[in-house]
Image (cartoon, rainbow, N blue to C red):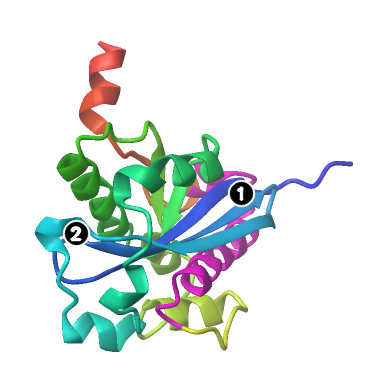
């Protein structure tokens, strides 16, 4: 009997500064039927308009301007993200931030927004666990995933994936649609306007 469980791609970005288009690293974890089947991460060179690395951000993730000097730009590496996801819905912890990175970076580069849905694991965690805080380390620990390097984008994506897989187990959901129905955490389109235009 084939395993039953959610399939999705967890994603996490780190940024050089407070501008959402300043992505400097991404972590990706592919989950298929509730099991991690692939993982990857790489550096991104922020756009020249928002390329400054603020001390605050560097203290958080440890990535410096010199580290990304030879990295691909957003437009150059976006196809790699999309190829990894291969049509999956995205899941992110505080997804408004990570989806905001995609939107802002695509707007600045002139790339079309991916036609993908996304789910926020913070919203899922709030409706699954009773915690004092739903920050990623605490929510991940509740899901049985702990002792990871917070703000490493791959480790954060893995933690996010663990939360969603465990929440599906708790709620008896076989997929993200079922988890959304059980928790009220909405599956949203990344490009709502384009999705609406196609439907009309």
State whether residue 91 appears in this view: yes
| The stretch drawn in magenta includes residue 143 | no
**Which quadrant holds the C terminus?**
top left
Q: What residue is at 16 percent from the left and 80 percent from the top?
A: 54
| The stretch drawn in magenta includes residue 172 | yes
Residue 190 vs 57, above or below: the answer is: above
Q: Is mark 2 on a helix, strand or loop?
A: loop
Tell me where residue 178 appears, x and y as whole percent: 54, 43
Dot 1, how many residues are within 10 Å of its Cα: few (below 14), some (14-19), or many (20+)? many
Residue 111 vs 24, above or below: the answer is: above
Span highlighted in magenta in the image: 150-179
Which image quadrant is residue 71 in? Answer: bottom left
Left or right? Give the position of 188 relative to 20: right
In this rendering, the label closer to the viewer, 1 or 2: 2
Q: Is mark 1 on a helix, strand or loop?
A: loop
Which residue position holds label 1? 173
Q: What residue is at 46 percent from the left and 76 percent from the top?
A: 139
- 3D distance between C-alphas at marks 1 and 2: 32 Å
State whether residue 130 appears in this view: no
Which residue position holds label 2? 20
Q: What residue is at 26 percent from the left and 75 percent from the top?
A: 65
Q: Is the magenta stretch mostly helix, strand or loop?
A: helix
**Residue toward you, 64 or 107:** 64
Q: Which of marks 1 and 2 is nearer the N terminus?
A: 2
């Amino acid at each position: 009997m084939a395993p039953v469980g959610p399939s999705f791609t967890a994603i996490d970005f780190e940024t050089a500064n407070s501008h959402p288009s300043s992505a400097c690293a991404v972590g990706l974890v592919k989950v298929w039927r509730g099991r991690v089947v692939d993982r990857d991460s790489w550096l991104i060179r922020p756009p020249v308009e928002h390329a400054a690395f603020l001390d605050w951000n560097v203290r958080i993730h440890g990535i410096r301007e010199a580290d990304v000097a030879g990295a691909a730009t957003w437009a150059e590496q976006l196809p790699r993200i999309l190829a990894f996801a291969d049509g999956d819905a995205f899941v992110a912890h505080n997804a408004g931030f990570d989806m905001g990175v995609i939107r802002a970076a695509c707007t600045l580069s002139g790339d079309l927004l991916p036609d993908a849905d996304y789910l926020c694991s913070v919203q899922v965690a709030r409706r699954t666990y009773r915690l004092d805080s739903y920050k990623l380390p605490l929510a991940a620990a509740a899901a049985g995933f702990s002792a990871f390097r917070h703000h490493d984008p791959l480790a954060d994506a893995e933690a996010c994936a663990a939360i969603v897989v465990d929440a599906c187990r708790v709620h008896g959901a076989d997929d993200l649609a079922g988890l959304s129905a059980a928790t009220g955490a909405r599956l949203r389109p990344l490009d709502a306007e384009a999705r609406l235009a196609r439907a009309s």
